[in-house]
Each structure stands twice: as C-alpha cells, then as structure tokens.
Image (spheres, rainbow, N blue to C red):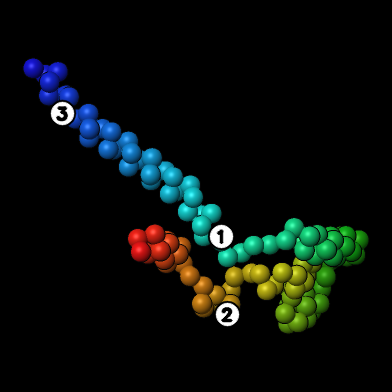
C-alpha cells in the first residue's frame, strides 16, 4: 500500500527537476544577455594599457606626488594620478547612466519578444 502512494509523487518530482534545470539555465545565461550592448575590440585596450603602464613606471621612479599635484590632476578630470582619464567614457557614473536599462528591464523586454 505504501509503495502505491509513492508512485503518485513521481510526476511531481519530474516537474520539480525540470523547473530546477530551467532556473539554473536562466541564472547562467542571464549575465550573457545583459552584456549584449557592450561589445569591445581587443585591440583598443592594448594602447591604453601601454600608456597606463608607462605612467605607472614613471610614478614608481619618482618620489610620491605632493597633495597639491594630486589635487591639480583631480581637478583636471583625471580618475587617479596614474590612470589619468583613460577609459573614463566607459565607466558607469550617474551622468552617463540615466538611460541605462536594468537587468530586470532587459529580461522583461526579452520575455515580451519571446511571447509575441
């Protein structure tokens, strides 16, 4: 008798396993869908990194910068004393993120496209 009662739960176990697989799949592919808009070229980063490396080497050879020099570089719009303003346009700040879509909005848009 007890064996017959356990047979009732077999389709439920199968359904739970399917739901778990779908959740794992969506969790793994969600970040990839969120990155669709930011494609980058590998050749662009190398020249900027060489400049940053050169500035770093120069900073290591010289004595530490004074507070006034650091403040003057910061007032010029540099991110920090070594990196300067490299990749400043790629960094996410409130000024350039007003029209950005959240992950939730991107998923909703993707689901709308799938269901239409």
Residue at 56% from the left image edge and 60% from the top image edge: 35
Outermost residue toward the front in this view: 116
On screen, residue 51 above or below 6:
below
Real-space Cα distance between discs 1 and 3? 43 Å
Q: Is residue 4 left or right of residue 78?
A: left
Tag 3: Cα neighbours inside 10 Å, few (<14), some, or many (≥20)? few
Residue 27 location, x and y as percent?
44, 48
In the picture shown, does residue 59 fall above or below 6?
below
Q: Nearer the viewer, mark 2 or mark 3?
A: 3
Residue 78 image position (x, y, % from top left): 74, 75
Rendered image: mark on residue 8 = 3
In percent of width and height, residue 96 lies at 58, 77
Q: Earlier in the sequence, mark 1 or mark 2?
A: 1
Determine the residue positioned at 38% across, 40% down: 21
Which quarter of the figure has residue 20?
top left
Q: Quadrant of residue 9?
A: top left
Which residue, given by chain and number where applicable, does mark 1 sit on? 35
Looking at this view, is 78 or 61 the one in front? 78
| Mark 1 in CB contact with mark 3 (< 8 angstroms) | no
In the picture of the structure, the residue carrying the numbered disc 2 is 95
């Amino acid at each position: 008798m007890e064996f017959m009662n356990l047979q009732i739960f077999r389709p439920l176990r199968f359904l739970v396993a399917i739901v778990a697989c779908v959740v794992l799949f969506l969790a793994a592919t969600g970040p990839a869908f969120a990155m669709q808009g930011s494609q980058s070229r590998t050749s662009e980063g190398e020249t900027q990194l060489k400049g940053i490396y050169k500035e770093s080497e120069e900073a290591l050879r010289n004595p530490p910068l004074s507070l006034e020099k650091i403040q003057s570089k910061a007032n010029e719009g540099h991110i920090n004393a070594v990196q300067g303003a490299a990749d400043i346009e790629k960094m996410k700040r409130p000024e350039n993120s007003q029209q950005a879509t959240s992950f939730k909005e991107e998923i909703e848009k993707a689901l709308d496209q799938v269901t239409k």
